[in-house]
Image: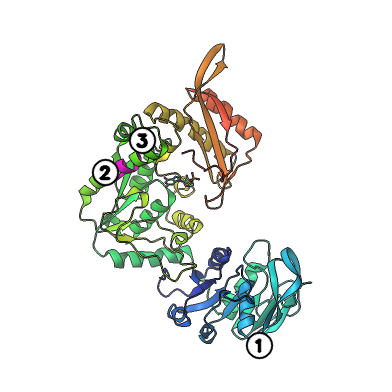
Amino acid sequence: MSTAPMSTPTVLVVDFGAQYAQLIARRVREAHVYSEIVPHDLTAEEIRDRKPAAIIFSGGPASVNVEGAPIIDPGVYDLGVPIMGICYGAQLIAKQHGGEVSRFEAGEYGRTDLTVNRSDVFLDGQSAQQSVWMSHFDAISKPPTGCEVLASTANTPVAAFAGPGLCGVQYHPEVSHTPEGQAVLENFLYRMADIEPTWTMGNVIDQQIEIIQEQVGSGRAICGLSGGVDSAVAAALVHRAIGAQLTCVFVDTGLMRKDEGEQVVEVFRRNQHIELIHVRAADEFFTALEGVTEPEAKRKAIGEKFIRIFEKAQGGIEDARFLVQGTLYPDVIESGSKHAAKIKSHHNVGGLPEDMEFELVEPLRALFKDEVRTLGSELGLPDEIVWRQPFPGPGLGVRIIGEVTPEKVAILQEADAIVREEIGKAGLEREVWQAFAVLPDIRSVGVMGDERTYGYPAIIRAVTSEDAMTADWARLPYDLLETMSSRIINEVDGINRVAYDITSKPPGTIEWE
Ligand code: XMP
């Protein structure tokens, strides 16, 4: 299923199992050309029906000479659409076009010296000697019929080739270790495929506004705001399209970070002028959490309470037929399967009930997270929202070990605010994936002034990560840790000790529960 905005020239990135397919798609978009990732087992007709302006074959882990290696329907070469191959993709073009791929004595991995022998349009403007990133054991020994060899390395005689409507590189132009790689992609897009670089966030806003207006008509839509960036940007975009037909619901669970509830309400009601139902439900959540200590039981109690409260709030706008969601492109990539993600008529994202019958409005379906952040800024959302760290649905409830009480939440909010403030002052907000404080269910003895203290420790958790699937503990400077520690102990009543969590994921998780 295509997420392409209508009439936008689209580049299809055919995925041959590379971890690089997403990166290629992003580099194309950085060249202001819209791109989508598709699986390699689409037929030529299915590819033609998507009307691509150009096609890029990704790399992949297989050898084209092994039986069962992923291939592409050869009919794709007859569509008259320019094709570029990268690594495995380049080898596949050679193999399917009268060329040859062989196993050489040595593969090439990492930084490799490349010599450009002929520039042609494809390598026009490229340095004759340059460093490129390689990762292959097979190499092309004979270029595809009708193509000329443009570049080589010590172990790869055909490191780049081009011919009418076809080109390929053995190296990876999409990675930052190939400094001139983006220019190669741009030569392909702008000059070989004749695509104009018109895809910008400004255009995305205009196109999405049209799409949303057409979908929603004069109907009413609701959007559950979590305080996170995705729902915030989706709401701001939909609001720009349908104005007062959108109502947002923000359930303040009492488990948000310090001042977060007020900030969300302030931004949406006063800055964005979006109609907002602000449900203050802290008491109800604390009652539901009384005596609950087991992590899963806590999550369940919070999730259930959330559903009931959202349902009640929605009662006030029961004619709403559309539900706005901040679903992102990585959630919908069809990679590896022909079967596109089906649009559900119900959903369970954000703890919403599965049996609510809504038509979904998902204006961010085609975008990566960093694009959503750019879009959010263009829509006038402040940095505090756009650059907010990921925050779990159950909020501070999973960062307080043992029973959650209002007193413990107040302590944790203060300690957490200091951690985040100091990360901000150190300019590390965008380097660190998440940085926060955890309040364990133990106390220890200390001494402050001449007084014996018996208080909670605060545990600082700061991690670096690409996607939260794996994470490493952040090597924060000692001075920064020192400042956090002394501020927390001096400023937060009830805390007399600070520890730093040096566990990566795996084996730990980012959150403590
Ligand atoms: P873990 O703790 O599993 O967390 O390493 C991975 C990422 O997911 C976030 N997280 C959640 N997000 N609802 C959410 O919306 C949740 O229940 C939840 N639990 C964890 C976490 O903050 C981290 O970014």
Amino acid type assigned to the residue bearing label 1 in the image: Thr
Mark 2 or 3, closer to the camera: 2
Disc 2 to disc 3: CB gap under 8 Å: no
Q: Looking at the rendered structure, which numbered label has been put on residue 399?
A: none
Q: CA distance from mark 2 to mark 3?
A: 16 Å
Q: Disc 3 marks which residue?
A: 254
Amino acid type assigned to the residue bearing label 2 in the image: Arg
Q: Earlier in the sequence, mark 1 or mark 2?
A: 1
Magenta-highlighted residues:
302-307
Q: Secondary structure at mark 2?
A: helix
Q: Looking at the rendered structure, which numbered label has been put on residue 145?
A: 1
Instruction: Please tell me how many numbered marks the rendered image carries.
Output: 3
Horizontal and vertical percent position of residue 327 = 40, 58
Q: Please identify the quadrant where the N terminus is shown.
A: bottom left
Horizontal and vertical percent position of residue 437 = 50, 34
Q: Neighbour class for label 1 at 10 Å: few (<14), some, many (≥20)?
A: some
Q: Say which of 276 and 102 sits in front.
A: 102
